[in-house]
Image: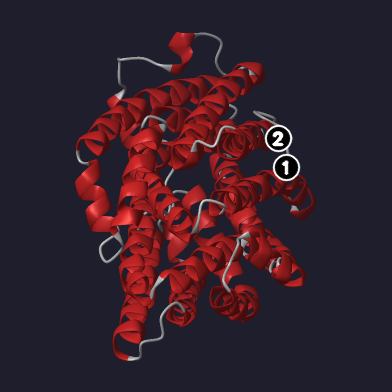
């Protein structure tokens, strides 16, 4: 599809492009779940500690991901124009700036790892903090590899190669799972083994990603990936397109870490239930997440062609698919709740909490999540990159965090409070995104690569 000016954007083509992204996202979602199951063999403290550190790792990786997201929109618009030079130039600039930034972040995390853990696990036991510090220190060395992986998958989707992005993601996540199982079950390395698995798996993802970019023909040598000659104009465009979304994701992961503080005092059963519930929610939302993952590329290609009617039509098609695919995927874990409880080695109390919340997810996932995820991703593809992230941040912090804080502090609801906090968040976001869509503000705010 890449640089094909005869490419037609319609519902059928969009769905065809989404198939490899769906497989990709299922691996991205399922394998961390399986890894958590493997780690749960080490006990609830280890499982909870690893889950929290994984959130920290996602948080600090947002800088690289933000640049990659901006690059994905830029290369999608260049692809729509048929400008191959613009694509290859943007790819090199994206890898270079994000790697420099990621190396700086890695050094800071290694230096301040103790302080980071003490802050993130405030209220947790000393055992959990010790486990978390060990896991964070090992996994911090994986940041540069994850930077390369994130750039690769985002850019490949942007130029219309979602299948190659899928291969890269499957290779990385499968490697993490296999090495994790070997380290914990075979070599008995405990949480250190889990950290080594993440490090090695991400290295595999970077290597496979490099091969996929070379295979796609957009880079052939090291200088096509990295340069110290930064093009300030290109960097500025990528930042403009990506940084607001990166800040949105940073705020989202930051909110998750803050919410841990309100749940941890209720004990291990409540936090273990929170870990399982959150991972099952990610699985239930996978349909709309898939559409959100591909929407910027599809909308960016339409924008690059200057096709305003195509932009409007693609937006409607993306949300149509998001609703039906999201509704179908929301039922995935429901028939397997007993097996899930056994796999996670959950206590009866923890299982009871998680099961009630997972069943209840169906209501708002089907009603709200499809639009709250697909709409802002589509807006971003045409360069409407400022207000949608502001809406998301408002929803997460005003809707989710404040509701959780109130329900846990005043009503002592524990993890159950998270369910109602999610409803408040997604309801607020959906209303605001719909207002932006109906008002036409998203079209007036669009920006191109010029």
| Label pair 1/2, CB-CB below 8 angstroms | yes
Q: Which residue is most to the bottom?
A: 411
Q: Quadrant of the C terminus?
A: top left
Q: Secondary structure at mark 1?
A: helix
Residue at 60% over, 53% down:
37
Q: Nearer the viewer, residue 274 or 206?
A: 274
Identify the coloring: secondary structure
| Mark 1 Cα shell of 10 Å, populated few (<14), some (14-19), many (≥20) | some
Q: Which residue is mark 2?
A: 163
Q: Determine if residue 9 is in view.
A: no
Q: Position of residue 97 (x, y in %)?
A: 33, 27
Q: Quadrant of the N terminus?
A: top right
Q: Secondary structure at mark 2?
A: helix
Q: Nearer the viewer, residue 40 or 449?
A: 40
Q: Position of residue 4 (x, y in %)?
A: 70, 30
Q: Position of residue 209 (x, y in %)?
A: 58, 25
How many dots with numbers?
2
Q: Earlier in the sequence, mark 1 or mark 2?
A: 1
Q: Is residue 54 left or right of residue 335?
A: left
| Mark 2 Cα shell of 10 Å, populated few (<14), some (14-19), many (≥20) | many
Judge whether 31 appears above or below 76 on screen: below
Judge whether 350 appears above or below 78 on screen: below
Judge whether 213 appears above or below 10 on screen: above
Q: Which residue is mark 1?
A: 20
Residue at 39% over, 49% down:
53
Judge whether 223 appears above or below 411 on screen: above
Q: Determine if residue 398 is in view.
A: yes
Please tell me the numbered disc located at residue 154. Answer: none
Q: Position of residue 280 (x, y in %)?
A: 60, 64
Residue at 43% over, 75% down:
425
Residue at 60% over, 16% down:
214
């Amino acid at each position: 599809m890449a640089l094909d000016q005869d490419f037609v954007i319609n519902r059928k083509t969009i769905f065809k492009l989404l198939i490899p992204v769906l497989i990709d996202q299922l691996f991205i979602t399922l394998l961390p779940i399986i890894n958590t199951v493997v780690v749960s063999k080490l006990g609830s403290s280890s499982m909870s500690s690893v889950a929290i550190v994984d959130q920290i790792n996602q948080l600090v990786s947002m800088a690289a991901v933000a640049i990659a997201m901006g690059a994905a929109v830029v290369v999608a618009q260049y692809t729509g124009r048929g400008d191959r030079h613009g694509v290859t130039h943007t790819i090199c600039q994206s890898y270079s700036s994000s790697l420099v930034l990621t190396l700086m972040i890695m050094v800071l995390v290694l230096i301040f790892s103790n302080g980071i853990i003490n802050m993130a696990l405030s209220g947790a036991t000393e055992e959990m903090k010790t486990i978390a510090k060990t896991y964070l220190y090992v996994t911090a060395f994986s940041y540069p590899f994850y930077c390369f992986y994130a750039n690769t998958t985002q850019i490949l989707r942007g130029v219309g190669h979602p299948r190659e992005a899928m291969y890269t993601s499957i290779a990385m996540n499968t490697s993490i799972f296999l090495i994790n199982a070997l380290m914990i079950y075979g070599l008995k390395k405990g949480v250190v083994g889990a950290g080594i698995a993440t490090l090695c798996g991400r290295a595999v993802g970077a290597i496979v990603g490099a091969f996929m970019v070379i295979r796609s023909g957009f880079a052939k040598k090291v200088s096509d990936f990295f340069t110290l000659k930064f093009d300030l104009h290109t960097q500025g465009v990528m930042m403009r397109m990506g940084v607001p979304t990166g800040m949105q994701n940073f705020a989202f992961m930051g909110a998750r870490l803050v919410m841990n503080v309100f749940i941890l005092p209720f004990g291990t059963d409540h936090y273990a239930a929170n870990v399982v519930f959150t991972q099952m929610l990610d699985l239930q939302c996978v349909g709309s997440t898939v559409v959100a993952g591909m929407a910027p590329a599809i909308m960016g290609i339409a924008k690059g062609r200057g096709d305003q009617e195509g932009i409007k039509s693609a937006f409607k098609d993306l949300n149509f698919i998001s609703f039906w695919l999201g509704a179908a995927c929301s039922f995935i874990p429901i028939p397997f709740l007993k097996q899930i409880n056994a796999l996670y080695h959950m206590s009866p109390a923890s299982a009871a909490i998680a099961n009630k919340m997972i069943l209840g997810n169906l209501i708002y996932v089907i009603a709200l999540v499809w639009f709250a995820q697909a709409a802002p991703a589509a807006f971003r593809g045409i360069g409407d990159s400022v207000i949608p992230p502001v809406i998301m941040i408002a929803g997460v912090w005003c809707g989710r965090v404040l509701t959780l804080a109130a329900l846990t502090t005043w009503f002592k609801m524990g993890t159950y409070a998270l369910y109602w906090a999610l409803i408040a968040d997604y309801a607020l976001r959906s209303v605001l995104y719909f207002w932006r869509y109906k008002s036409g503000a998203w079209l007036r705010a669009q920006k191109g690569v010029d």
